[in-house]
Image (tube, rainbow, N blue to C red):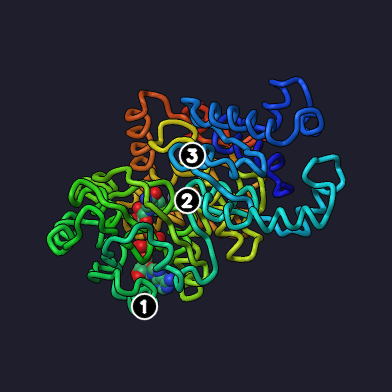
Amino acid sequence: MGAGKSTVGPPLAERLGRPFLDLDRELEHALGMTIPELFEQRGEPEFRLQEEAHAIAALRLPDPAVIALGGGAVQTPSIRNELAGRAFTVLLRVDPDTAWERSGGRGRPLARDESEFRALYERRRELYGEVADAQADDLDGAVLAAAGVQVEPRALERLGSLVPGDGSVALVTDPHVGGIYGAAAQVALGPRLASVHEIPQGEEAKVAAVVERLWTELRLDRGGVLVALGGGSTTDVAGFVAATYVRGIDWVAVPTTLVGQVDAAIGGKTAIDLPQGKNLAGAFHWPARAVIDPGTLETLPEEQRLEGLAEVVKTGLLAGEPLWELPPAELVRRCAAYKAALCVRDPQDEGVRVVLNLGHTFAHALEAAAGYEGLTHGRAVALGLLAALRLSGRPTEIVEQLLRPQPVRVDRERAWAAMQRDKKVRGGELRLVLLNDDGPVVEARPDTEVRSALDGLIAE
Ligand SMILES: NC(=O)c1ccc[n+]([C@@H]2O[C@H](COP(=O)([O-])OP(=O)(O)OC[C@H]3O[C@@H](n4cnc5c(N)ncnc54)[C@H](O)[C@@H]3O)[C@@H](O)[C@H]2O)c1
Ligand SMILES: [Zn+2]
């Protein structure tokens, strides 16, 4: 009661692309009376019976929905059963003072007397903890909980308790990250840690030979968990190994770069590179958890931070909020939540997730024209964002100030050809993610406009 279910519920449902059901409201509607009236006229036991029937019916609906349960519903054992079997249950945390402030003296039958209200809160507290699959404090927290993403200062120290199940754990990391955070991770994993595997730093790890070596080294059974500690390269290759080893085991991503924390560790895409191109062999294999400790960013070199900042600016532009102005931990949390919601809605990248490509069509063309050398992804995205904003008729100052994109020296024809290839792959039409007042839109633009936007990113 008073945790904010009716406030958080509707926007949460919207972010996840699901209908919202408020059980108390449904019940009132079905019975043609308010809940205080129901309590008054028929008593609490009758209310609980009605609540049980409606809750179970809602939980058995075939299509996923966001459902707000009444505060006392989990006291009914059959509802708890149904929750365990069919729902992902998020407890919205609230302290008793706030809860009373929000619910007290408003005619709610169980919130009339403050001391009784507080006693009820205490009685229910333990039960809530048992029923909840995850806990959250606000809308973004609920999105992250639903996506299995834990953003928390010092999360690394709690890694042991954040790795699901009780199977053996194999830790995969690169020598650099392992040197800084490996010992802390090993201590946190404790006796469950069965082996540690070192892979090369950066993109060099994303090759078939590394996958094969890990396949051979691992001694996990199907209940084992692979923990990937490092940047996007580490989580991409380790996630792919987890997707394929003994036909798939659970894995936990522990991203330590800004790119990893706001992008690579979220959404379940895993991949390695082939000689023909980047990310050409991979799988969708959602990590059982992403454990994000923003504190690990403190050791990140500046150029690596800038790589991530490009995705942060992209996310802020998409969300229509200056997320880049937030302090680091909150910035990571908000950006991670933005991506997580889209990925929960569109796990296989067949729909709404496309907006995450803002600036990326141009970026990919420039990267291809540069032969994937001398131009980092972040710098290419910074330029791509510039082009997308120009084509959208929107101000470009933020990108210029924060990312300082510099025109690249690449062959114009080669860049344009790369864009045309992209177009062919997408069925003959180049659909760009652009921005308007309501947020992102996907649009085709005449070749001449696109070409001149691309040319504007290339140095003379
Ligand atoms: N799966 C996805 O959805 C997705 C999304 C975005 C990017 N990616 C992939 O991510 C990769 C890029 O990842 P990245 O940008 O995180 O870089 P990275 O993983 O290549 O790491 C870069 C360097 O940073 C070092 N490093 C990592 N964490 C550190 C820390 N906390 N302190 C000091 N040094 C640290 C590493 O040792 C490494 O040398 C690309 O291969 C890209 O394709 C995947
Ligand atoms: Zn990107």
Q: Amino acid at mark 3?
A: Ala
Q: Nearer the viewer, residue 161 or 301?
A: 161
Judge from the rendering whether residue 6 lies leftward or rightward of residue 281; answer left or right.
right
- Position of residue 446 relative to residue 95, above or below, is above
Q: Nearer the viewer, residue 317 or 169?
A: 169
Q: CA distance from mark 2 to mark 3?
A: 38 Å
Q: Nearer the viewer, residue 5 or 309?
A: 5
* Res 456 seen here: no
Q: Residues within 10 Å of mark 2 (few under 14, many from 20)?
A: many
Identity of the residue furthest to the left in this view: 216
Name the residue rendered at 32%, 58% in the picture: 373
Q: Amino acid at mark 1?
A: Val
Q: Nearer the viewer, residue 393 or 194?
A: 194
Pointer 2 residue = 381
The percent coordinates of residue 59 (x first, y second) are 52, 32
Pointer 1 residue = 187
Evaluate if marks 2 and 3 touch, with contact meaning CB atoms under 8 Å apart.
no
- Position of residue 246 relative to residue 176, above or below, is above
The percent coordinates of residue 124 (x first, y second) are 64, 53
Q: Nearer the viewer, mark 2 or mark 1?
A: 1
Q: Nearer the viewer, mark 2 or mark 3?
A: 3
Q: Secondary structure at mark 2?
A: helix
Mark 2 Cβ and ligand 2 under 8 Å apart: yes
Which mark, by number, is residue 87?
Answer: 3
Q: Nearer the viewer, mark 1 or mark 3?
A: 3
**Residue 326 falls in which quadrant of the image?**
bottom right
Mark 1 or 3 closer to N-term?
Answer: 3
Name the residue rendered at 38%, 36% in the picture: 348
